[in-house]
Image: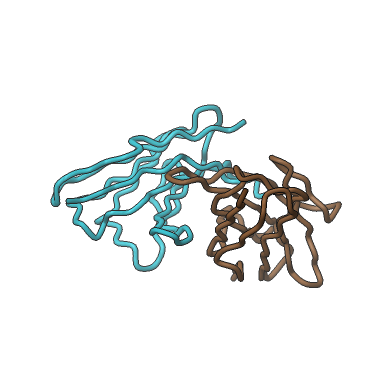
């Protein structure tokens, strides 16, 4: 079984400050990890993924995430937040051995960036 | 990039009506499509997994006679909410992927907001 936890329902940050959105996961094997962003009344947009290799992954819109195997974490980060980054963020995991390609999502974290 | 089109984006209809939602992969062949339901301020709940040419696999607690899924081609899957009632009001989102590429992300449609009066 695979699961994802996003411990914060909401993260508040001032524009220009760094942001972190936390994610921890649990899989039986090695994971594929993803971050998605959702704007109001829209579907999910892919931000970045970790497959293998370098633990620091860079994605769209200046976001990056760091894979930490020992802590089973994949926190999303951005050095300088923008008001337009305000949205709902979802972390997701897929077990490498999952032939069905099914993703398991965390509960989501609402990011509020204030001017 | 891979594009998934979902239609309609918003539906308002009377109780008892059946509503069909379409999910199309515009520039790739989607061997697998997923249907999700999302309640306000909540995460996505997987309803079913649909593989082209075969019957959908429904998650526990999802009524297959209520939510009919058809995936007749590699670019189109449909979800029909039969005899919809107010409790079926929700945001429905589809996603698509190509089986055999587990490292690839799912590509999501923009969702359909269904409101049953």
Q: Is residue A112 left or right of residue B94?
A: right
Q: Farthest residue toward the top?
A: B27
Chain drawn in cyan: B
A38 up-or-down from A10: above or below: above
Q: Which chain is brown?
A: A
Position above or below: A45 against A56: above
Please name whichever residue, A73 or B47, is drawn nearer the observer in this view of the structure: A73
**Foreground residue, A99 or A88?**
A88
Residue A19 coordinates in the image, percent (x, y): 71, 56
User: Which quadrant is home to the N terminus of chain B?
Assistant: top right
The location of residue A15, given as percent across then percent down, is 68, 49
Q: Is residue B12 left or right of residue B8?
A: left
Number of numbered callouts drawn: 0
| A71 sits to left or right of A82 | right
The colour scheme applied to this rendered structure is: by chain
Where residue A54 appears, as percent x and y from the top left, is 86, 52
Is residue A42 visible to the viewer in this orientation of the structure? Answer: yes
Q: Residue at x 74, y 53 (%)?
A: A17
| Residue at x 62% of width, y 46% of height | A85
Q: Residue furthest right?
A: A54
Q: In the picture provided, is B70 more to the left or to the right than B85? A: right
Q: Residue furthest front?
A: A115
> Which residue: 69% across, 40% down?
A61
Q: Quadrant of residue A100?
A: bottom right
Q: Which of B49/B4 is in front? A: B4
Residue A2: tell me if it is visible.
no
Residue drawn at (41%, 63%), measured in percent from left and top?
Answer: B59
Q: Please state the horizontal and vertical placement of residue A115, each as a whole percent of the image.
A: 62, 48
């Amino acid at each position: 079984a695979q699961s994802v936890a996003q411990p914060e329902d909401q993260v508040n940050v001032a524009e220009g400050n760094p942001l972190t959105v936390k994610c921890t996961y649990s899989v039986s094997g090695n994971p594929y990890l993803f971050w998605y962003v959702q704007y109001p009344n829209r579907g999910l947009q892919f931000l970045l993924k970790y497959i293998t290799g370098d633990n620091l992954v860079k994605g769209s819109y200046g976001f990056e995430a760091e894979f930490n195997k020992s802590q089973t974490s994949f926190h999303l980060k951005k050095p300088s937040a923008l008001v337009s980054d305000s949205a709902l963020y979802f972390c997701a995991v897929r077990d490498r051995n999952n032939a069905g390609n099914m993703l398991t999502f965390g509960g989501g974290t609402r990011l509020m960036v204030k001017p | 990039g891979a594009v998934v089109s979902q239609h309609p984006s918003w539906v308002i209809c009377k109780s008892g009506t059946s509503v069909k939602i379409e999910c199309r992969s515009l520039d790739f062949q989607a061997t697998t499509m997923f249907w999700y339901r999302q309640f306000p301020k909540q995460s996505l709940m997987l309803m079913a997994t649909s593989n082209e040419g075969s019957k959908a696999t429904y998650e526990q607690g999802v009524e297959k006679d209520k939510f009919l899924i058809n995936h007749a081609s590699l670019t189109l899957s449909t979800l029909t909410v039969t005899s919809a009632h107010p409790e079926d009001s929700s945001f429905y989102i589809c996603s698509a992927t190509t089986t055999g590429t587990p490292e690839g992300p799912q590509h999501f449609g923009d969702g359909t907001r269904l409101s049953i009066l």
